[in-house]
């Protein structure tokens, strides 16, 4: 520290301008606190710049591209010229979206009195933070701090991401050309989402997963439809398979993989994408100087108010234990801000919805059947297939089903899950129902608009009660 | 087998009353698990298991008075195999044999899930519960399938106006005392309806013993003086904005404590005691000020330790906390022992003067009385001033009347001229 340095004083300092950090900053601004938000790269964090938004833009593009093939069935004749994909143009389009969103966040921060500082922040003590920006060093003295530094892709030691042949999720979304072949290490949701999207754009995709199925965290019955569809798209799925070695030979990636069934084999592809999990960014921010305790896996444990072991320092988002999801980060950010603002706020719900933009989409909230049974509930299940829904047929999206899981004693909803078109939007009803502690009758008795996919929830709920209209009740 | 003898949990306590057994004979306990609640010198103490094992025998019933050093229960340690208890083991085996194990296991899981499952309530009701500082898991829902409604919360709050943590302990105690009184009234029958007889026990008995000891040992003399409080009041008012900013409710008491401590430093025999065994006078160079506090359970004297090292605001804060803890019956032994001088602030209730009884073995006690506007003579003219009396009872063995008057004069000088008080403060 420089002798005689003057620290800028602020009520709250937030490290990290992702969906958790900026939400906290804006809420604190609303509550009249002075806030400094430090971001080393771009506002919006992984979600906006390298994750949720760009990947959904790619997935949507791939869907549109693929849909052209189905149009003939509906009588649409395209000109004879074959359809092509210019990923370079797509990059510009994507940049437009992310930049518009970033400007929106910057504007909201400004309007709420948030000072945004670009730089790398690190704690100097439990009430000071130093921020380094292009060689300059500024110190800030704070009353409270929120750590929102997020996470980054985990890369195993035997692989080196070069951004050209071996990619992580970030660099895979920056490709200028559609690769002819792509091998994906990891069959989790990022691998499946991007794998299916590239497959639709014409890439020959191979997915290598160590577990015995893809999406191992998701209930098996929900994943089946996706596995079937991935195979239909030509995706080669290798489960119970591990990657032993990766090397680049003559402009191609050679992955040495082994499995009990196939033994050793080499998967050759133009590019490889590594998506086997994320690690929290808890190093290099001087947590020890602030006295903040970090767990074995680099996470910072917090209470329901998002407080760390140091009561005036909070942590939110991927750096805390739990699923690395933007909506969880935002919720925690708002709670941390409100607690700092003296409001009685808390993250007190176990209902963290999940959404997977596979084809078809998977989304859910609450307990799966297995989890409910493990917790000792006696469970009733209602299921309704999209193939019996008029709207699904009319839009040629008949794959999938809605499933509701109910406590047989009280009829309280325990979980709602869906695989099918637009499941990501439809799960909103599930989140609301679970949070309002609804009974299955509540869903069944509500008039759902027709013709929509939302009727799937109503029919699944009626199926639990034994009187669904559009399927035979067994 | 380990015998658990009633320990001396207070300073020089001789006996305790068994208030409540928290376990039953034959019950397995973990080390440090609370076993029995004992009432000692003015506080309740929870005694814990010295080792893990099975409680074999309980020797006293609730309500019994037990002398220190008496065995109150025995415990068979977990790893103590020397005396196997056949009866117990057989009983356990029988339980397993008689029931269908599978059914039992299922029953247990179902039960567990009901304990695990969280209270049914909407996010808004949860938020409301936090605002009302109500633990929502404790509220019984009246809505569909046991859902907790807004009115359930309100009702719960009304029925539980004492804070959640204290509620159980406190309620139990009050109920117990009321039961004792009711039992006593019933026992005497109808023939004596003009009088009531209630056993002298518990805290009231302790207070009685303490008072007798004090008065029979110490030759008490009481000296009374009056103070003019206008300037101190003005001074306190000037500090109001500052103390409000710090969120501290400033009363006169911290100023009194400060003035008394300054005077005690100059008149050392007032912060002293006599060791009757060795015939020595103990002059104390530390200033632990007891504040006699009225509670539902009787007079309790929480102690501000090292009052001379604390600021007015620190004192204010500590007094508030101690008083709250005293009222809730949550003071520890440490917080009510070791005072070197006691203040009895009866002013808020009323009264002109008193003959306070010294908190044995201290040398003096100062009672502060009601503050009121009185007509007084200043410069041969009648004027109205805010006046307060104080009564100092002192141990005439140690302190002469002249010393006592000099002592109160000094307090008077400091409180009537708050600027001098500030100058003398450390």
Image (cartoon, rainbow, N blue to C red):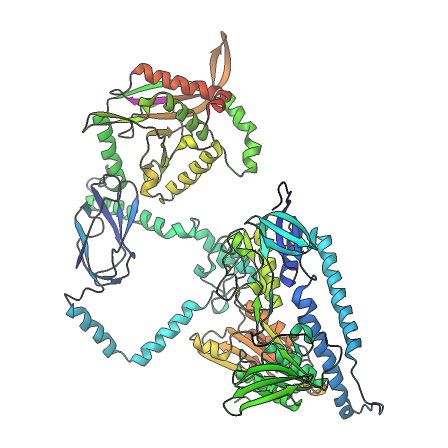
Query: Which is nearer the eye, A356 or A376?
Result: A356
Query: Which is nearer the eye, A226 or A202?
Result: A202
Query: Which is nearer the eye, A291 or B409?
Result: A291
Q: Is residue B241 above or below residue A448?
A: above
Task: Where is residue B224? Give x, y as percent.
Answer: 36, 18
Q: In this view, does A222 lie above or below A305?
A: below
Which quarter of the figure is the N terminus of chain B placed in?
Answer: bottom left
Q: On the image, which quarter does residue A55 sit in? A: bottom right
Task: Where is residue B214? Give x, y as percent.
Answer: 24, 29
Task: Where is residue B4? Give x, y as percent.
Answer: 20, 53
Task: Where is residue B125? Give x, y as percent.
Answer: 54, 60
Q: Give the residues drawn in magenta, as a range.
A: B391-400
Q: On the image, which quarter does residue A359 sit in? A: bottom right
How many numbered badges does the structure rendering display? 0
What residue appears at the point 64 percent right and 74 percent down from the top-left corner?
A161
**View extreme (front): residue:** A250
Which quarter of the figure is the C terminus of chain B placed in?
Answer: top left
Q: Is residue A282 above or below residue B292?
A: below
Relative placement, left or right, of B170 versus B131 is left
Res A463 visible:
no
What residue appears at the point 38 percent right and 44 percent down from the top-left corner?
B328
**View extreme (top): residue:** B380
Relative placement, left or right, of B328 versus A234 is left
What residue appears at the point 47 percent right and 32 percent down from the top-left corner?
B311
Res A348 visible:
yes
């Amino acid at each position: 520290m420089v002798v005689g340095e003057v620290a800028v004083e602020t009520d709250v300092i937030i490290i990290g301008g992702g969906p958790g950090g900026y939400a906290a900053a804006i809420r604190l601004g609303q509550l009249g606190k002075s806030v400094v938000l430090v971001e080393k790269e771009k506002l919006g964090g992984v979600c906006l710049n390298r994750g949720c938004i760009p990947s959904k833009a790619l997935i949507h593009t791939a869907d549109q591209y693929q849909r052209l093939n189905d149009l003939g069935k509906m009588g649409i004749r395209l000109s004879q010229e074959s359809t092509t994909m210019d990923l370079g143009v797509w990059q510009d389009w994507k940049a437009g979206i992310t930049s518009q969103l970033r400007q929106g966040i910057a504007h909201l921060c400004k309007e709420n009195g948030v000072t945004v500082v670009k730089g790398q922040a690190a704690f100097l003590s439990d009430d000071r933070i130093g921020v380094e920006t292009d060689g300059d060093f500024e110190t800030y003295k704070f009353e409270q701090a929120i750590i929102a530094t997020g996470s980054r892709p985990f890369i195993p030691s035997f692989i080196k991401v070069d951004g050209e042949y071996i990619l992580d999720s970030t660099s895979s979304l920056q490709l200028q050309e559609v690769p002819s072949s792509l091998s994906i290490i990891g069959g989790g949701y990022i691998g499946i989402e991007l794998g299916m999207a590239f497959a639709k754009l014409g890439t020959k995709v191979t997915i290598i997963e160590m577990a015995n199925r893809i999406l191992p965290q998701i209930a098996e019955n929900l994943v089946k439809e996706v596995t079937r569809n991935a195979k239909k798209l030509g995706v080669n799925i290798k489960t119970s398979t591990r990657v032993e070695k990766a090397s680049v030979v003559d402009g191609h990636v050679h992955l040495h993989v082994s499995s009990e069934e196939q033994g050793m084999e080499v998967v050759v592809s133009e590019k490889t994408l590594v998506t086997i999990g994320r690690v929290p960014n808890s190093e290099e921010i001087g947590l020890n100087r602030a006295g903040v305790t970090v767990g074995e896996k680099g996470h910072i444990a917090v209470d329901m108010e998002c407080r760390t072991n140091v009561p005036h320092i909070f942590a939110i988002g991927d750096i805390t234990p739990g699923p690395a999801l933007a909506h969880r980060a935002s919720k925690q950010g708002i709670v941390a801000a409100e607690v700092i603002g003296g409001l009685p706020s808390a993250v007190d719900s176990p209902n963290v919805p999940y959404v997977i933009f596979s084809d078809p989409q998977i989304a859910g909230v609450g307990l799966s059947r297995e989890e409910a049974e493990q917790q000792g509930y006696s469970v009733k299940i209602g299921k309704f297939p999209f193939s019996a829904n008029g709207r699904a047929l009319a839009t040629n999206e008949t794959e999938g089903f809605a499933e509701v899981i109910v406590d047989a004693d009280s009829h309280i909803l325990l979980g709602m899950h869906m695989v099918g078109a637009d499941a990501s939007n439809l799960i909103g009803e599930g989140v609301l129902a679970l949070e309002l502690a609804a009974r299955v009758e509540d869903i069944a008795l509500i008039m759902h608009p027709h013709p929509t996919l939302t009727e799937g929830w109503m029919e699944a709920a009626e199926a639990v009660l034994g009187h669904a209209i559009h399927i035979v009740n067994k | 087998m380990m015998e658990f003898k009633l320990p001396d949990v207070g300073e020089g306590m001789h006996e305790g009353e068994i208030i409540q057994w928290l376990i039953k004979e034959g019950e397995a306990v973990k080390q440090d698990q609370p076993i029995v609640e004992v009432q000692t010198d003015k506080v309740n103490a929870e005694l814990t298991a010295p080792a893990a094992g099975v409680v074999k025998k309980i020797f006293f019933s609730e309500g019994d008075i037990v002398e220190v050093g008496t065995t109150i229960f025995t415990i068979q340690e977990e790893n103590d195999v020397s005396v196997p208890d056949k009866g117990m083991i057989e009983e356990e085996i029988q339980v397993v044999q008689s029931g269908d194990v599978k059914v039992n296991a299922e029953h247990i899981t179902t039960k567990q899930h009901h304990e695990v499952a969280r209270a049914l309530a909407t996010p808004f009701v949860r938020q409301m519960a936090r605002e009302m500082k109500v633990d929502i898991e404790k509220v019984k829902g009246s809505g569909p399938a046991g859902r907790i409604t807004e009115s359930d919360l309100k009702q719960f709050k009304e029925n539980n106006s004492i804070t959640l943590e204290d509620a159980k302990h406190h309620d139990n105690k009050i109920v117990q005392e009321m039961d004792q009184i009711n039992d006593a009234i019933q026992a005497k029958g109808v023939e004596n309806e003009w009088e009531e007889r209630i056993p002298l026990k518990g805290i009231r008995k302790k207070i009685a013993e303490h008072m007798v000891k004090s008065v029979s040992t110490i030759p008490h003399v009481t000296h009374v003086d009056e103070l003019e409080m206008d300037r101190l009041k003005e001074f306190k008012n000037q500090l109001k904005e500052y103390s409000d900013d710090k969120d501290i409710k400033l009363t006169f008491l911290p100023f009194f404590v400060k003035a008394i401590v300054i005077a005690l430093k100059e008149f050392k025999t007032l912060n002293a005691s006599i060791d009757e065994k060795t015939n020595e006078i103990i002059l104390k160079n530390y200033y632990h000020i007891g504040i006699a506090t009225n509670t539902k359970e009787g007079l309790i004297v929480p102690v501000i330790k090292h009052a001379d090292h604390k600021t007015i605001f620190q004192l204010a804060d500590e007094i508030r906390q101690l008083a709250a803890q005293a009222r809730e019956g949550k003071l520890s032994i440490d917080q009510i022992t070791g005072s070197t001088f006691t203040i009895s602030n009866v002013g808020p209730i009323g009264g002109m003067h008193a003959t306070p009884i010294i908190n044995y073995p201290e040398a003096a006690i100062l009672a502060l009385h009601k503050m009121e506007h009185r007509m007084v003579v200043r410069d041969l003219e009648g004027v109205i001033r805010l006046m307060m009396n104080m009564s100092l009872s002192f141990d005439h063995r140690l302190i002469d009347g002249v010393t006592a008057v000099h002592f109160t004069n000094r307090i008077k000088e400091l409180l009537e001229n708050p600027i001098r008080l500030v100058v003398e403060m450390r």
